[in-house]
Amino acid sequence: MKPVLALLVAFLIGCGCAPGQEAARPIMVDHPEQLENLFAALDQDHPAMAPICRDWELGRRQEAVEALDAYFRKKSAGAALTQTPRLPGNVLEQAEAALQRRYYILDQWIEVPATPDGGLDWTWRGPQGDKEVAWMLNRQAILPILLQAYRKTGRTEFRQEINRLLRDWILSNPYPARLNFSPQWRPLEVARRVLESWIAVFYARDCLDQDTRLLLLSSLLEHGDALRNHASFWGGNHLITEKLGLLAIALAFPEFSDSAGWKDYAMEKLSAEFLAQTYPDGSYKELSNHYQLVVLLSAQRFVRLMTVANPAFRKEPVYRRIEAMWDYFAGVMKPDGFGPLNNDSDLEPNDRYLASAWETFSRPDWLAMATGGEEGTLPSGPASRFYPWAGQAVLRNNWGAQADWIFFDAGPYGTAHQHDDRLHLSAYLQGRPVLTDSGRHAYQPGPWRDYFSGPSGHSTLLLDGRPADQGPRVARQPLPVEYADTSKCVFAAATASFSQPASRFGLPSLRPSVPWTRAVLYDKRYRLVLILDHLVSFQAHEIQANWLFHPDIPENSVGNYLHPGGPSTDWQVVALTGRTEPPLGGFMSPEYNLKRPATRLLHTTRVDRPVTLAWILQDPAGPPVEVEFLSPAGAPIARIRLLQEGRIIAEAELRLHPQPELIRYRHP
């Protein structure tokens, strides 16, 4: 045995351990290259590292290793660096299960197989073969859970499991030193591991054995290199998270010689990415409430880190853009505090996150919006919101729990996680969900993915079984959306088109595309919604109006909330609820991997000329409202009356083609 290795064996086996720690196994002796790389990467100009590096270079390696371990064992880091995601309510249950290799991942219990040497199979995709399972497993979110269980109970087996999992992961997954798409070294997992577990566990007192601490330190160095030199090249929320992980390593470990460069690079890159990946109205370009939150959580940590690292940060444009992102997140919130399910989204509690973010930006209006006015200061002016770059209008009457909320999406397709949902509509009436978006459910290709991301999972129109052309992935300027908020109503409208399919020989169709305008009008006095769908065609087509109702609305009640208005149309009406055979239909997904039966109501008819379809959406507690057309069917300017029990309650004149416009709306 070489003298250096013999010295390390004597140190790692025989040296004193911190209270409550077992004698360390000689892991670093078996992997001396890790130790060599670690000491080579220390900053010799750092006051605490200089004498340690000197001992190492002079051959006093036992002293150097012991001093390095003692330094980091005593060192602490601020809350901004050691923060982890909110822990689940069943910490002890999950910690106990982890001792048996069982983990709660994506709302299901997963038992991970063991490798021949007793470690975990870190490539395991779960019983469904879902790669998301392997990604989540490699983020090691179980480590903070085990740490919390250890803090609560003092049971050493929880701390031992932390050490075992860390050693197993590091030693069984060597750093590839290149861009890698394995679940272990995909750049996003590298960053999430750093941000959500490793730094917090590293700086937790009396948590790590000595050999684990050194091994983890050497792997964190490799994680920094991976995030600096081998990160994603496609951008998006992945890149933001990855650069935030790099910034966190740089600030948590200034003892690395590369940390200063990492910090400057990460700060510059993050500022540029937050501005590039969001619109001026604060919407994230993927246009998903779920991924808006993912980026916001990164942005919030970025703000906390930068406030410490750079006191002038609050004057930077990126700081104001992050504030606009939170403001958008507040403005689209539903009466129950959750966000919309637009594109790939889960039901995210927007109100809970706003309640913890408002102080950072001194925005008591967010707190009031999140609490229904019980705390904070309600914003002045109308409650409805319009986001021109997102192309989204939120029509509502107040910020209370019993409010009406109509979400109209006429914006870009989104840069990722898109759904084919052009001009989709979601709605709450008197605080109760009525029309819903589908949610994301899963990413695995197949019929279920097709349903949840396709038009059938949304309240939109289909022409001859096909959805309308989707918007551009990215808007270079706001898309044309008409929006007006008057004393009587809130109005939003936009146009789309249905392209005709190519011929069987692949040639472009000679049939013209069919323009479609959807106009949505919310009456503030009567708390009802008028929806007009205007199509311009002179050839025969089948129109299918698709409406997806929230699971809380029974199938036999959906007609009480939504009914077609005049002119008379020969509708064929079918309701599908929880259909698991082709064609799939009638589900809503509140969270990844979960789905709930929900009624999908289809109105089908045929037209061969311009037509205007009218719909009334209202709470069934009041008398039904009917639509009377005073203008010819399909006319570009619609003149209508709304009647309740034979009495005229409103009159409207609207231009629907070529560009929509609210000409007038009044109550007699």
Image: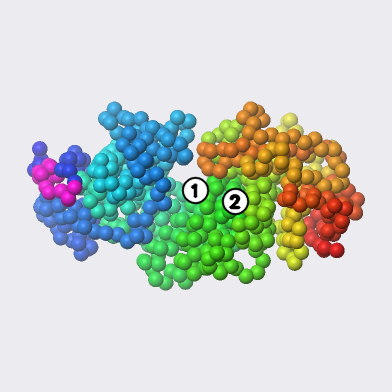
Quadrant assignment for the C terminus: bottom right
In the rendering, at what x and y percent does residue 612 appear? 83, 48
Task: Judge from the rendering whether residue 386 lies leftward or rightward of residue 7; answer left or right.
Answer: right
Query: What residue span does the magenta drawing correspond to?
Result: 7-20
Q: Is residue 483 above or below residue 556?
A: below
Q: Is residue 297 magenta?
A: no
**Residue at screen point 83% across, 59% down:** 650
- Residue nearest the observer in this picture, 524 or 265: 524
Q: Mark on residue 340? A: 2
Q: Is residue 194 above or below residue 127?
A: below
Q: Residue 47: in sight, yes or no?
A: yes
- The amino acid marked with disc number 1 is Trp
CA distance for labels 1 and 2: 26 Å
Q: Is residue 317 above or below residue 446?
A: below
Q: Dot 2, crowdedness within 10 Å: few (<14), some or many (≥20)?
A: many
Going from the N terminus, do you reach mark 1 or mark 2 first?
1
Disc 1 element: loop
Disc 2 element: loop
Q: Mark on residue 234? A: 1
- The amino acid marked with disc number 2 is Pro
Q: Is residue 17 magenta?
A: yes
Task: Judge from the rendering whether residue 179 lies leftward or rightward of residue 407; answer left or right.
Answer: left
